Image (cartoon, grey):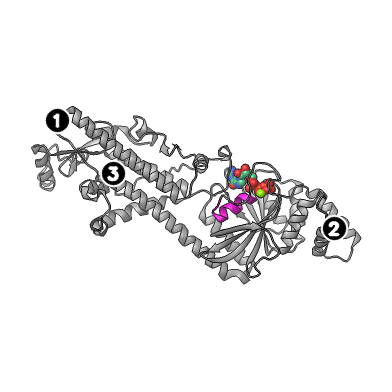
Amino acid sequence: MNVADKASHQDIPSLINIAVVGHTNTGKTSLIRTMLRSNQFGKIEDSAGTTRHVERATIFADNEAILNLHDTPGIEDSHALLRQLKSIGTHHKSFSPIEILEKFIATTSIDDPLEQEAKVIRQILRSDVLLYIIDVREPVLEKYLMEIEILSKAMKPIIPVFNFIANHTAELAIWRKKLAVFNLHTSLEFDTVAFSFEAEKRLYQKIQTLVESHYDQLQKLINYRATVWDQLCLSAAKRIVELIVSVACYRESKRNQSDSHANSTAVQKLKDFVRKSEQSCLRDLLTIFNFSEKDIALQKIPVSNGQWQLDIFAPGVLKAYGLDIGSAALKGAATGAGIDLMVGGLSLGTATALGAIAGTGWSTFKRYGKEIKAKIQGMQWLCVDESTLQILYLRQQQLLSKLMHRGHAAYQADQIDTTTASASEKLPSNWPDIINTLQQNPIWCKPSTARNQDPQYQNIEAKLINALLANG
Ligand SMILES: Nc1nc2c(ncn2[C@@H]2O[C@H](COP(=O)(O)OP(=O)(O)OP(=O)(O)O)[C@@H](O)[C@H]2O)c(=O)[nH]1
Ligand SMILES: [Mg+2]
């Protein structure tokens, strides 16, 4: 639960107060949105001076308020500000740096050109920690170093947070070096768009080391967030497993060989089932992660109007997912793209791979004799072929990994620096066995207590979940 309201003088004293400061347009409000898991907080725009007032948001661990985040207007004119502070210092030689800052606030009127800066200074003096947000794409200009010099006068711990880090490693190194001159060694990389839970955890851990009096409260928050995150990822993985299982177990009965109309209706029915199942899974996954249309565009997820852009049965789909077309064609495609023929409990694709149809070997016959007999007797079903199941899995895996890496920050889709398509997407190690078992258990197509308590099913579910989450 998050609460955001205008800054007031009545901050709850026991809460740690964190001011989010920095040059204008560096992503301060974006960072707060990501930390709040809400895109309702403040206003974000790709232009200077978007945030005009200090705004407070409280972060909770379950029902317990843990910390206040204070969004501040961006510093725009550090030259003029530093000049002003120096001038106060010259007139009040005995003033400490903090007293100079206080004098500056007291003497800056509402219509002063440095009014925004005065709001920032007022907030930093009231805060326990400062998060100084840096746009690493920018060169280390003098004005930024002046900002740091000004902030350090408040004698508060400063944590530099590098934003826009994707594809900017060289710039990051330069920034680090420059900050070391100011004795700022504890920095963080936190791309608010390509959000990672680990980066957020490190942020709280850094604050913990700087404000030890709030160590336990922050630990509560870290633990709470970790639990919530794990649950979120687990329910998403479970939803994907449900999809794979229902599609792999699904069978459509095939009448007789000559009735081509009935057969093509059955093929259509099967394909519709797969498309609808995938679509409903997509909808659920986006809901679980609270993703909007805008987020989908930002993460370059190939989905429009709630549907995958590339139909799962489209001719180019195998190639698009880097699958071996040659071997897929050999195994499946008994009755049309994406459809296999199931004979008894055994699909033709599987049977061919096992050599059962070729009739080789006594042991194969002993194992699959019933299915082969069934084939001879003409009991046949249509099922989804293995390559389609592979695509189905890979597509959800890719989606899950994108859903697990995003903030609530970004605003314009074209601002993304990289796509997050991962080369490590692959099938679980025992994939053929898993599919084979699923295909032989059509009763698992729908959830049931019997299914969910079956150790063989539980084993498959666990393997798929582990594989999905290991890749996230
Ligand atoms: N690619 C990318 N864009 C970001 C990131 N963080 C913020 N942005 C974008 O940067 C722009 C500025 O973000 P804001 O959060 O409004 O920045 P701000 O520092 O609060 O700006 P002011 O309130 O004007 O000082 C917006 O267009 C954001 O979508 C990031 O990590 N990566
Ligand atoms: Mg802002």
Do the numbered discs 2 and 1 sit on residues whose CB atoms are within 8 Å? no
Q: Amino acid at mark 3?
A: Val
CA neighbours of label 3 inside 10 A, class few (<14), some (14 to 19), many (20+)? many
Do the numbered discs 2 and 3 sit on residues whose CB atoms are within 8 Å? no
Magenta highlight: main SS: helix
Name the residue at 56% across, 59% down: 2
Q: Is residue 378 visible?
A: yes
Q: Is residue 439 left or right of residue 468?
A: left
Q: Is residue 74 left or right of residue 94?
A: left
Please, what secondary structure does the residue beneath circle 1 have?
A: loop
Q: Amino acid at mark 2?
A: Thr
Pointer 2 residue:
107
**Does 258 lie within the magenta span?**
no
Pointer 1 or 3: first along the chain: 3
Name the residue at 24% across, 33% down: 267
Q: Amino acid at mark 1?
A: Gln
Q: Is residue 441 visible?
A: no
Q: Is residue 271 left or right of residue 204?
A: left
Please, what secondary structure does the residue beneath circle 2 have?
A: helix
Pointer 3 residue:
247
- From the top left corner, tell me how far across and down residue 62 is, in percent: 51, 64
Magenta region: which residues?
Answer: 28-38
